[in-house]
Structures are given as structure tokens and as C-alpha cells.
Amino acid sequence: MGPGTLVRVVEITGIGVREGTDGAVILPGESTPRGSVLGGVIDHLLVTEAAETAGRRTTLEVPVSDPDAIAAGLLCGGTATLLLSPLTDLPDTTPALWADAEPLVLVAEADGSGGDLAVSTGSVAGSLWNDTSTDTAVRRARQILRSGLSGAEIDEIEGRRVVFSAAVPTTRAMIVGEGPMAEAFARQGELMGWDVSFVADLATAEEFLASATPADAVLMLSHDPDLDVPVLAAATRSAVGYIGAMGARHTQARRARQLEELGHTDRSRIHGPLGLDLGSRTPAETAVAMAAEFLAVRRGRPPRSLSTHDGPIHA
């Protein structure tokens, strides 16, 4: 990998809602980063800092004022702690994983010391300070990959603070079926930035599932027995992160019976009837309930009101 600087978020205080893909690469001689941190509000500072620290690892604490934050589309100001490191520090497999848009977690000590560990769904490269810490970090990184969530989080390993920077591809949501509910969910998914597609046959569905990742979802809206059960069976064998099946109780029972006849006794990954119980009535309201359940499952968070706990809102 050539010269340049990778900028990763270590920790955020304040700021509010932001994109989960904060991160940038700054190449020598370029006046703007590739990628962005905090909506671009501090990109000019990062270019200057990268030039001054080229070739060495460093952390940078940057305050962001309320006016600057709001101008960048953030909710409020705060402080960002960033890790700047040379691209040459990264394991050799990293560029290929980036190029193939593979789900990837980069792991490093939060203070910038040590090396980097790159964990994808099928590979591990690099290491931390010993074999035990590396094994622990790999297990945690794999949990993060299964959540389908991009972003940065801090964990403690053997008394040291470690930052896990996850880059997960755009969520793909496959809708099997058609009608007002399918159209409503497609609009909701597009609002979330997901890549939504409609499928009406088993072969196309199996093609989607063959490349599915934990960031992806399958929404079974069809009630056709020749389509819904084979697709659900294929989905349970795939890496797809969420499987939702719409239908009344008798439809769910019929699917369960036919899946069992095919040897699929573990149906715990299938959420049917799909969606959270929000009292939804219209297709648009039901689409919100469906998307909300997908997010809760993918993040491993029990659905509940933010007002019922006193921890960080976006933790």
C-alpha cells in the first residue's frame, strides 16, 4: 500500500446523529480527503494534520462548535477523538478487501500504539500485542460484522483500550412479492439508504442469497407456497442478517410445517409475522415497523423506548 494517512474515529462526545461510515484516506498532494469525517466539518484540519504527521501514528482531539456542526448536517457540537495512521501500517490484504467491498473491521489500540488487525468475514491479517489479545479482538470483530453495523466502538482488552472500526457494505433488502406493502417498504428502505430490489422467482432469490452478508435482509411478502418456503429455506442457509416473513398465523404455521418437512427444524432466524408491534395499520406504518425490527435484530438490541433507560442515546 502506498503513502497516505488513514483517519479513524476513536470516540465521539456530543455531535448527535451522524453517518456510521466516518473515516477518510488522505493522500499526499491532495487537498481533500477521500471519504469524510463528521460530514466534512473538519476535513480541512485533517489534511493539514496528515501532512504534519505523515509516516507516524498519532491521535487528535478536535472540538466542533454547534454552528459548524449544524452547518454540516449534525445535530449539535462536541468533541471527536481521531486516530491518524500511515496506510503502510495496515495489513497487506486491506486494499483488496476495500476494493471488493468486503465487510471489514480494523482493530487498533485507541492511543495509536501497536499495529493493526484486519478482520473480514473470511480472513484475519495482522495482530495486536500478543496472541491472546489478537484472538479476543477477532472474536469481538466477528460479532460486530454479524451486527451489520458500520462505525467505531471502544472495548477493553487486557486493560488496554482498543478501537474497532467497522466498514460494512450498504444494506441490500430483497423483497419477495409485490403490492402496496412491498412498495411501502421499498420507499422506507430507500429512505434508510438501503439498496432495495424486488424478486419474483426462486432462481433470482438464490442468486441474491449466495452473496448476502449480515448487513442484508430478506422480506418475504409472497404467500405462494411454491415460492415462499423454498426462498425461506435458502435464506436460513445463507449469511443474510435478517429474514422477515409477512403473513397471518395460519400462513406462518403452514410455512413452519413445510419447512420442517424439508428438514429445517431450526426456524429461529425467521421473524414471522415480521415487524414490531407498533399498532401499525397502513402499509406505510407497517413498513416502519418492519424496518425497525430489522434494525433491532441486526444491532442485537431489544426494542424499547429511549426514555426507559439512562445510558448514552446512541450507544
Image (cartoon, rainbow, N blue to C red):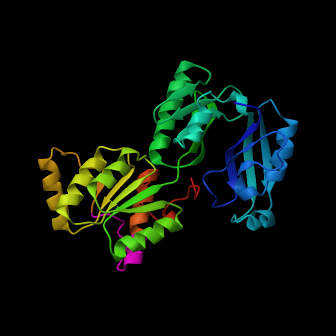
| Residue 87 percent location from the top left of the image | 71, 33
Residue 277 among magenta residues = yes
Taking the spot 17% from the left edge, 55% from the top edge, the residue there is 256
Residue 78 visible here: yes
> Is 25 in front, or is 165?
25
Main SS of the magenta segment?
A: loop
- Check the image and report above or below for 119 versus 206: above
Give the quadrant of residue 265. top left
- Check the image and report above or below for 82 versus 197: above
- Check the image and report above or below for 315 versus 66: above
Give the quadrant of residue 313. bottom right
| Residue 16 percent location from the top left of the image | 66, 61
From the viewer's perspective, tell me whether residue 145 is left or right of residue 220. Answer: right
Magenta span of residues: 273-288
- Check the image and report above or below for 230 versus 128: below
Which residue is situated farthest in the top direction here? 130
| Residue 211 percent location from the top left of the image | 41, 45
| Residue 101 percent location from the top left of the image | 54, 44
Residue 146 among magenta residues = no
> Is 230 in front, or is 255?
230
Residue 112 visible here: no
Taking the spot 27% from the left edge, 55% from the top edge, the residue there is 202
Q: How many marks?
A: 0
Which quarter of the image is occupied by the N terminus?
top right
Taking the spot 71% from the left edge, 55% from the top edge, the residue there is 38
Give the quadrant of residue 197. bottom left
From the viewer's perspective, tell me whether residue 102 is left or right of residue 300. Answer: right
